[in-house]
Image (cartoon, rainbow, N blue to C red):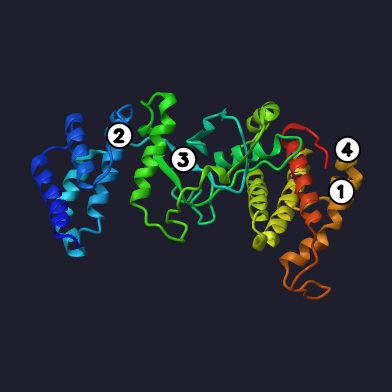
Amino acid sequence: MDENHRNKHKQFLNLNASKYRGKTRLSKSDLKTVFHGLINLLELPYPPSELIQYFLHPNVVSYLLIQVLNSDNLTADDRFALHDSFDLIHKAIKEERSNYSINFRILAPGGLYPNIELDRGGCKYSFINQLPVLITKNRIKKDIFSDSSIINWLTRNELRFATSVMCAPEIGFYHFHFTGYNSLYIDFNCTKLIPKELIIYFLRELLDIHRRFTPIGVRFWHRKPLQDVNEYEFSDYLDSIQYFNLLFDNFSIRDDLLLRTCNYFVKAIMHWDNQINIEEAITNTFFCLEGCLHLIQKKHGEYAPNLNIKLLKKIFKENIPFGENVFDYIQEGYEKRISLIHAEPQWGADWDPFITSEDYYDYFKICKSLINYILIDRHLDY
């Protein structure tokens, strides 16, 4: 441990606590002074001049202050001794909260990405330094248990956006590749005064600051190096914008069955990119297919939780091109589904159930077509 750095951290907290003692809220001038001190203490580069005024937000200053107390330059005993000084400054900063959050993600290689910006309903897909990014505005739930399961890996709006991107093109397997790192979650209040054209640059700069304080490693809460832009694949998406908009507008983020179904859909194609996860890709495709069947019968007025095979046959025959053949093919896949999700089916265990790549592609394309039908009554070729 560098004793000089240790003393600087201790002095910063103690001196500022003494300076602002008795203040219940730091003024804009105070925040500016503290921010400049934090940048120098933490040995960070200053944000670009066009952005620096937006980094004087109390939430950003509060985050940087926390990094001082968490610094490896301090011992556990130091942190305990400095807690009162830290607490005095931290309370006076007065973080601001709204009913919305902003989620910012740098998307990962492995997807097939639209080569144009897409902006709809508080969600924006764009590029910064040739890297694809997704920005979404999300309502913060008052229920502390809402959307807080450990398996919740996307926000509702991120899932809505990704599904719409995937389902809009008539051909091709466009998709986003999500990871649990290189993402940022902040309160909407931090961005409400930033000009629209600068928000993406502010978020990227703030993410890079967060990355400096996130350890590098293999665990999902660790950071990973950003990839070279040449590892990304883009394709023409101009002809798909109309259907993207329709799908997005008709996707209800309050429909848990739709969200669960599309969760399987989005994950299936990400699994397919890794040969080790091919079984998971096909399994998720079958799960998505089951969800589609439930959604279709609800679309036609049947709200029972069990599948009504007789009704579904009728719906496919009367409403979907080649529907009888498609439904028969879906039923044929049921044994394959059983062999994947049950260790020992009625016909006995098989450590590597026979599945072909055509099984994945065929059923995945059916899922894509059925989601289109569910949301906008559109039929795609299988």
Left or right, 287 with respect to 128, comes to: right
Tell me the amino acid under the disc marked 1: Phe
Which residue lies at the image location 17% right of the left edge and 64% below the top edge?
Answer: 77
In three-dimensional space, the C-alpha distance between marks 1 and 2, rounded to whole angstroms, equals 56 Å
Answer above or below: position of 245 versus 164.
above
Tell me the amino acid under the disc marked 2: Phe
Element type at mark 1 = helix
Q: Tell me, yes or no, if residue 1 can be seen here.
A: yes
Tell me the amino acid under the disc marked 3: Asn
Residue 83 or residue 35, whichever sits in front: 35
Label at residue 103: 3
Tell me the amino acid under the disc marked 4: Pro
Element type at mark 3 = strand
In three-dimensional space, the C-alpha distance between marks 2 and 3, rounded to whole angstroms, equals 17 Å
In three-dimensional space, the C-alpha distance between marks 3 and 4, rounded to whole angstroms, equals 39 Å
How many residues crowd around disc 3 within 10 Å: few (fewer than 14), some, or many (20 or more)? Answer: many
- Which residue is tagged 4? 321
